[in-house]
Amino acid sequence: MAGRVVLNHLGIAVTDIARSRRFYEELLGFEYWWTLEAPDELAAKVMMIDPPLGLVATYLRRPDMVIELMQFTAPGAAAAWKARRLNEPGLTHLSFAVDDAPALLARVPDLGGQVLWESQGPKSAWGQTLFIRDPDGQLIEIGTMEWRDKLPGGPT
């Protein structure tokens, strides 16, 4: 490997940045960092999407992660949402371990998300997990701390 390699951010396409900010900030503890209104001549080339895009990118951070909420504001620039399955190649989901899963899950609908109760696994020595969707359908795994506490050394 040549030089440093650091994770910069994870990008999530959204339809309403304000709604998504509220979801990620109030539910998962992200904080606002900064916003970029990217010029079409730059964004279209880099993203390999025909202009106009009207890309507004808002970055939210936590000590362990940065996400980029990308809203395409130009008419017709945003693609339609489609459900993804976890066995499709590519990035499938975000995952968080939480101290109080019932309290977090109770807030999901109020913040525009959906709890996928049908995904809830049984309780075990490894804790319990299930999936939620953010307001635009992004899958997010919510697990209890038992899982995280059993992992071998690594990121904290």
Image (cartoon, rainbow, N blue to C red):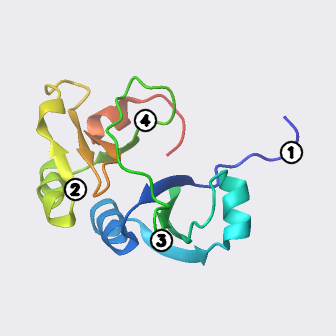
Q: CA distance from mark 2 to mark 4?
A: 17 Å
Q: Could one spot residue 109 in this view of the protein?
A: yes
Name the residue rendered at 53%, 42% in the picture: 155
Tell me which numbered mark, 3 or 4, is placed earlier along the sequence. Answer: 3
Tell me which numbered mark, 3 or 1, is placed earlier along the sequence. Answer: 1
Determine the secondary structure under disc 4: loop
Query: Where does the image place residue 18, in percent across and percent down from the top left?
Result: 35, 75
Label number found at residue 73: 3
Tell me which numbered mark, 2 or 1, is placed earlier along the sequence. Answer: 1
Asked whether disc 2 touches disc 1, contact meaning CB atoms under 8 Å apart, the reply is no
Callout 1: few (<14), some (14-19), or many (20+) C-alpha neighbours within 10 Å? few
Dot 4 corresponds to which residue?
A: 92
Q: CA distance from mark 3 to mark 4?
A: 25 Å
Tell me which numbered mark, 2 or 3, is placed earlier along the sequence. Answer: 3
Can you tell which quarter of the image residue 109 is in?
Answer: bottom left
Which of the two residues, 4 or 82, is positioned nearer the viewer here?
A: 82
Asked whether disc 2 touches disc 4, contact meaning CB atoms under 8 Å apart, the reply is no
Side of 10 where 104 appears, left or right: left
Q: CA distance from mark 2 to mark 1?
A: 40 Å
Which of the two residues, 103 or 45, is positioned nearer the viewer here?
A: 45
Dot 1 corresponds to which residue?
A: 3
Three-letter amino acid code at disc 3? Thr
Three-letter amino acid code at disc 2? Gly
Q: Is residue 126 above or below residue 27?
A: above
Name the residue rendered at 46%, 56% in the picture: 13
